[in-house]
Amino acid sequence: MTGVMLIRPHWRTASPAKLAVFIGGAFVAAEFLGASPLLVLVIAALAGFAWPAGSKT
Amino acid sequence: LSPLVLYLHLLKATSTTFAGLASIPVLQADLVQHHHVLTNQQINVSVVVTRSTPGPAGLYVVSVGYFVAGVWGAIAGWAAMITPAFAAVGLLRFLGRRAEHPRATGVIQAVVLASAGLLWVDALPLGRQAVTNPVLLVILVLGAAALATRKVESVWVILGSAALYITAASVNLVSGL
């Protein structure tokens, strides 16, 4: 329920590629690679800086 | 855990995420998996208490603090919840309009989306513990669908789920309440 609520505001503003990369990437990194949540968030922040909001992809 | 150490753990979780319940994965890793001072069921209870009462979603850290260290833990949770908010006021004053820069909003968007992915990792064990019969699985699917497709408040989903379960129990679809 919380996962759905977090994504809902970004459903239309973020591109499908961004949704797939950040949600799927975080899931895979934590579930299958055993990455710590904090590390995943830091990497996501760096990737978000390099991939600004409003870009076409 | 002393209240001060608990406060630092909770602060780490609340200050590295940008949405109320998004701090669950960090807290789960620290307090459930590493320190073993909290259980997944207690996290579930904290979230349900927060989502079915007035106030911000992030208030659940107060319940988490209470489960770990009683009243002092609850105070530590409350302090950890408000510290990032006070820090943000100062940061926004310093950053000003730069906070609306596409790169800044890109960082926030990326962290929130990654938090959602992390939450689903935590939702698997939490769900396995909570969904113990087919009726609960149906309630889970209906609740998620309602939230995803309609602008419905989570409190109505919780109340609707409770009503569905009570109805199912009253017609003996599930064993007692």
Image: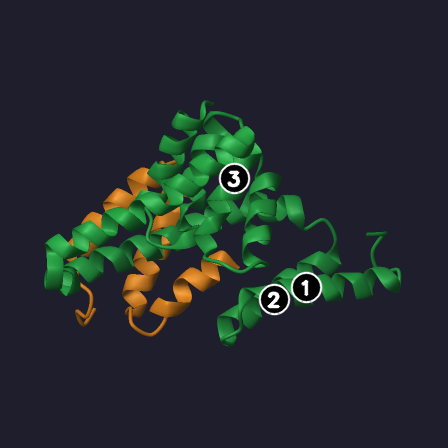
Query: Where on the picture, by quarter, is residue B116?
Result: bottom left
Q: Is residue B101 visible?
A: yes
The mark nearer the N terminus, 3 or 1, is: 3
Q: Closer to the observer: label 3 or label 2? A: 3
Chain containing the residue with disc 3: B
What whole-number distance in Å separates the C-alpha atoms at marks 3 and 2? 22 Å
Q: Which chain comes out orange in the rendered image?
A: A
Q: Position of residue A29 (x, y in %)?
A: 36, 43
Chain containing the residue with disc 1: B
Q: Is residue A15 above or below residue B64?
A: below
Q: Residue at the spot x=45%, y=57% of the render?
A: B56
Q: Position of residue A33 (x, y in %)?
A: 37, 38
Marks counted in the figure total 3
On the image, numbered disc 1 is attached to which residue? B161
Q: Are marks 2 and 1 in contact (CB under 8 Å)?
A: yes
On the image, numbered disc 2 is attached to which residue? B157
In this rendering, position of residue B52 left or right of residue A8: right
What whole-number distance in Å separates the C-alpha atoms at marks 3 and 1? 23 Å
Disc 3 crowd rating (10 Å Cα; few below 14, some 14-19, many 20+) is many
On the image, numbered disc 3 is attached to which residue? B64
Q: Is residue A32 visible?
A: no
Which secondary structure, mark 3?
A: helix
The mark nearer the N terminus, 3 or 2, is: 3
Q: Which chain comes out green in the rendered image?
A: B
